Amino acid sequence: MRRSELSYRHIDWTIVLCYLLLIFFGWINIYASSYSEAASGIFDLSTKAGMQFLWIGVSLCVATALIFVINPRWYMSTTWLLYLGVLVLLMAVLVFGKEVNGSKSWFSLGRISFQPSELSKITTSLALATVMSHYNFRISRPSDLFKILGLLAIPAGLIMLEPEIGTILVYVGFVFVLYREGLTGWFLFLMGMVILLFILTLKFSPFVSMLVILGTFGIIRGLHARQPLFFIVGYTLAVLLLAFLPKLLTLPSLTFLAEMGCDTVMLILMLGFCLYWFIRMLHRKERKTRWIFLGLVFCLVLTFSVELIFDKVLQPHHQARIENLLGIREDPHGIGYNVNQSMIAIGSGGFAGKGFLEGTQTKFKFVPEQSTDFIFCTVGEEWGFLGSLGLLAVFFTLIARILVTAERQKEANIRIYGYCVAAILFMHVLINIGMTIGLMPVIGIPLPFISYGGSSLLTFTLLLFMYVRLDLERWRR
Amino acid sequence: MAKDQYKQHLLTLGMGVFFLIILIRLFNIQIIDTQYKVTADNNALRYITKYPVRGRILDRNGLVLVDNAYSYDIQVTPYDVKPFDTLALCRIFNLNPEDVHATFAEYRKYRTRIGFQSKTFLKQVTQDQYSHFLEMSHHFPGFTAVPRTIRSYPYNAGGNLLGYVSEVDANYLKKHPEYQSGDYAGKTGLELLCEEELRGEKGYNIYLRNVHNRIQDSYREGEFDKPAVAGRDVRTTIDAELQQYGEYLMQNKVGSIVAIEPSTGEILSMVSSPGIHVSILAEIGKHYGDIASDPFKPMFNRAVMSPQPPGSVFKLVNALIGLQDGVVSTHTEHRCNDGFRASGIRVGCHTHPSPVDFRESIMMSCNAYYCELFRDILHNSAHDSIQAAFTHWRELVQSFGFGKKLGSDFPAEQSGYVPDASLYNRVYGRRGWSALSVISLSIGQGELGCTPLHLANLGAILANRGHYYIPHILKATDSTGLDPKYTEPVHTLVDPKHFEPVIDGMYRAVNSPPGSGATGRLAAADSLSICGKTGTSQNPHGDDHSVFVCFAPRENPKIAVAVYIENAGAGGSWAAPTAGLMVEKYLNREISENKKWIEDRLVQANLLEKARPKKKP
């Protein structure tokens, strides 16, 4: 391929426009969030808005360079070097890093500080693209799947040691890329089940989780049977009946069972059911239902390890945040304080918002981290539902456009990289906004292109514009 | 993998679902649910800041050095003010009506910015004014009295040491964005040093207003209120009684006292005189003009900020270096003919028996002896040039902590000064100088600058026979540990075995019988075996500075004291008795009857005028 064949006419202006809209909108919201009576101008470098302006300038230069100067071959061919380099940084940060809010994830060089975990998102995406585009790569083959999981697990493990939970969750987003590249949809389903069971068990009890498991697997089992209706009706009836188990146990004649507890009784019933299924399966040699059976057992085991995972693996402040989110523990002054204030700020915005610089909640500094992680509060308060809708629309357009163009790539590695970019952006938006409106636990993670912070803006710019440049490759003749 | 393309649509759809969930939630909290309608449009809510109680400052024994007392600020919400009797208000608070009009003109000018907020109208009104105002308050709608804590001081332990708290100004806010206008912060001394611990955390109450802007109710029964968190108490190493006694002795004198516990480096007291009396510390703003124009600069903490020539107490350092270098032995004797003479140079001395040996040279503070000794140090054949010898000497001097910041936790510590060879190379040329050119250094004069903290540290080094702990003023508590640098001994470059003869000289300087020529006899206290050294520092501004460094008891010392009194005269007549009383006060907790006359003499002496800074012509 000769360089002269590249045509810049085809730059994807939708993506670029979305990007420009987002950074501009972010910048004025940072100005508003740190605005005070005695504020100086928006360009004043001693203010956050001024610094962000400087970083926007740097980012635009980097974006331009990525498109016109830097040949993609430079980073596509050195992917492994970059990947390893970032791993070294991730290890170094554990030793030399600065501890901020309990996680040791920042390098600080004078006034500038950055997180290697941010860079790792880019290098991991590149590495995934390289490995998965290999001509004889099949994700359905266990050895290939494990290769991919290892590729993800090494940086994720190092980040776990910091620990930087937000980035870990972003890594979870890569599962969408794997799904697109051939991973079975059952995997996504199982992940959804894991989250659902986790929430149900914590919020209610293992009993409720087991009811849900039984119902769900009944439906799945039914869909694979010759007479679906029979199975579905049967399982539904069983679930309905079992739902009365707690009531049943209050009967005087059953006190010996009640002493064991509702959860245990249900577990015994479920184990009996599993045993019956297992024996039947051996007998009839049904291959199809084997996987469903394994899924069911997995879900049961998970349900009873939720408590253990929650108590032993998670740190106390994460436990508190999750409990607060699920409404298990009300604590509006402590853990719940941030979310409460953030929701008040957003909620007070109403339909059309209070107007630029008119927000009172953010101005009185009731919302913490209001120019970084909680920047969406300013958006919600000053621009209202309309502004929030607009912002989400821009994010949606950006991510959907990346997916559409990715699907059109001739080269598999560019498509995979595109999916990675989309997944990363999506997870960030989902977690960040979800947290400010009380849908997600509080996890420190920036809103792409909007949140204050030079290193985060620069990383997202790199991530996105590497794709914009790679996208041009499909117009080569 | 074209067959996988349906997955793209599925993923886009999935993303759409998640975004839709977010939108539904936003729609719910922004439009449907009224619970979050905390808006400035209807001004339904009013935030009232709750100020935290500032932490107390305790002495080493748990006595309270700085406490809190209540005071009242008068706040005004301009929006709620109705026309009122300005003169009546002025009568209560003793104000000038024009000032009040001007203030309100300002509120009108910025009314859009102020909105419904409250402004502080008057700060720290007296109890009388407060109760008077309370009776009349229904005449002044919009004005409220807000309780606030101010500092109170059970001991007169100097303003310089404790420092003061004042409202943050624009400049401070710029450097400390975490503060807000109206907050108070420690500005000097311990209040500054321990600002983080003492400060506490502000809270607020949220109240609902009705349409007439009256506060009605707590918003959602206080669910979103935030309580103020009181600041933590700070434990210092200061001994309150001793500190107060030191200030008592130093009244009407210019200078300072520093006392250190040698075995730990803990600062027992730090007096700087004249200081700021604690009675004005709480409301320092009102007295700022007087303080700033005081010629004696009461804000200036002499104990750590005023490097001066140490005078003869520095002979201790040269004596130790002489022994270390082997240029003098404890049997060396020198004659003194009213001083030292060599090639046209003469350093005078006072009258005392002659010749003197090593111990007697310290006991009687013979200048000639140290000129000889210092010449031997610098003209030592072990070094091939005067520069090398001088650099060696300087290195040893610096190992005593001189000429550098000791690294104490007390703010604004000065480093002092020890000259180096290059200075004399510049002044006299490389070959142009000898020991005789710098002979003043032998007796602690010339280009030397030591703070009283340095000198007290010298006392601690002698008490410990060769090492010191970095002096510090914060005491470790159960919750806060001490920086390890304060618990590691710092060793001087002089071998511990050389200290005993020097200490013997110091002991004799204080405890010899009358008529023996000992210089520090006024410091003596029965059975306390004080070891000390006088200094009489000449200076061009007036009478000599009176200096004394000591420690006690001789074995297993408990306290080291340095006293520096400016322009008072001989070290033996002013600084020595002051230090002696400090030691006695600390070790015995009281002054024996037979020394009361010394105490009276010191307290009654007014040496201020001798030290008054000359007006520049």
Image (cartoon, rainbow, N blue to C red):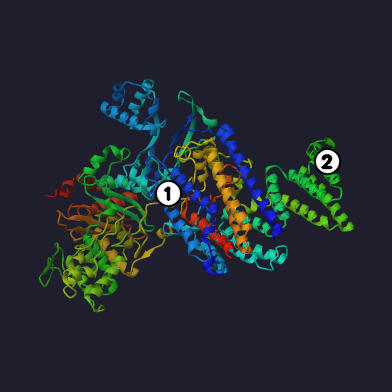
Please determine whether, in this image, residue B605 is positioned above or below residue A94.
Answer: above
Does the rendering let one see residue B608? yes
- Amino acid on which the number 2 mark rests in the picture: Leu
Q: Quadrant of the N terminus of chain B?
A: bottom right
Please determine whether, in this image, residue A126 is positioned above or below residue B109.
Answer: below
Label of residue A48 in the image: 1
How many angstroms separate mark 1 from mark 2 (CA)? 61 Å
Q: Chain of mark 2?
A: A
Q: Which residue is mark 2?
A: A237
Q: Earlier in the sequence, mark 1 or mark 2?
A: 1
Badge 1 and badge 2 both on one subunit? yes
Locate residue B434, reporting x and y percent.
18, 73
Locate residue A125, reporting x and y percent.
59, 61
Which residue is drawn at the image coordinates 83% and 39% (left, top)?
A254
- Amino acid on which the number 1 mark rests in the picture: Lys
Q: Looking at the image, is mark 1 or mark 2 nearer the viewer?
A: 1
Instruction: Please state which of residues B541 and B603 is positioned toward the viewer in this rendering.
Output: B541
Please determine whether, in this image, residue A98 is positioned above or below residue B183.
Answer: below
Q: Chain of mark 1?
A: A
